[in-house]
Amino acid sequence: MYLEIITPDENVFEGEVNSAMFPGSDGSFQILNDHAPMVSALGKGDVKIERIHEKKTEDIHFSIDGGVVEVLNNKILVLAESIGE
């Protein structure tokens, strides 16, 4: 599935992923391939992305300060308020 993470200032991440975990307002949740369509608010916390890169599984982490996630047709769009340090 395809994931795109953007803030008002920049495109943070674009690419194919195996799974993604997000900080929801009521706790963390994971998105896998063929997930049902949804829109959810995001809280402040860690986004964990798992992807295959050069035949190896790779984890990527971002800290976000809240936002919104939309899942539709194996595409995940994250509109993050900002990316933390």
Image: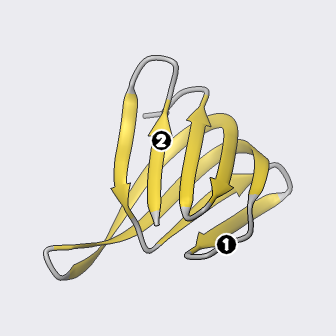
Q: Are marks 2 and 1 in contact (CB under 8 Å)?
A: no
Q: Secondary structure at mark 1?
A: loop
Residue type marked 2: Ile
Q: Position of residue 23 (x, y in %)?
A: 68, 54
> Residue sitting at 48 percent across and 41 percent down?
5
Q: Is residue 85 above or below residue 69?
A: above
Q: Which of marks 1 and 2 precedes in the sequence?
A: 2
What number is the disc on residue 75? none
Residue 42, placed above or below residue 79: below
User: Which residue ends up furthest to the top in the rendered image?
Assistant: 9
Percent x, y for residue 44? 67, 41
Determine crowd level at label 2: few under 14, some 14-19, many 20+ residues with C-alpha closer than 10 A.
some
Residue at 65% x, 57% y is 72
Q: Nearer the viewer, residue 33 or 61?
A: 33
Residue 72, above or below 79:
below
Q: Residues within 10 Å of mark 1 (few under 14, many from 20)?
A: some
**Residue occupying the point 40% across, 66% down:** 17
The residue that disc 2 covers is 5
Tell which of 74 and 63 is nearer to you: 74
Q: Which residue is mark 1?
A: 35
Measuring from the top left, give residue 76's x and y in whole percent.
56, 54
The local secondary structure at tag 2 comes to strand
Q: Is residue 62 above or below residue 37?
A: above
Q: Tell which tag, 2 or 1, sits nearer the viewer.
A: 1
Residue type at numbered disc 1:
His
Q: Quadrant of residue 75?
A: bottom right
**Side of 2 relative to 72 (left or right):** left
* Number of marks in the rendered image: 2
Q: Position of residue 10 (x, y in %)?
A: 39, 24
Q: Quadrant of residue 85?
A: top left
Report how far apart the C-alphas of labels 2 and 1 lie in the structure.
18 Å
Query: Which residue is at 65% across, 56% downward?
Result: 71
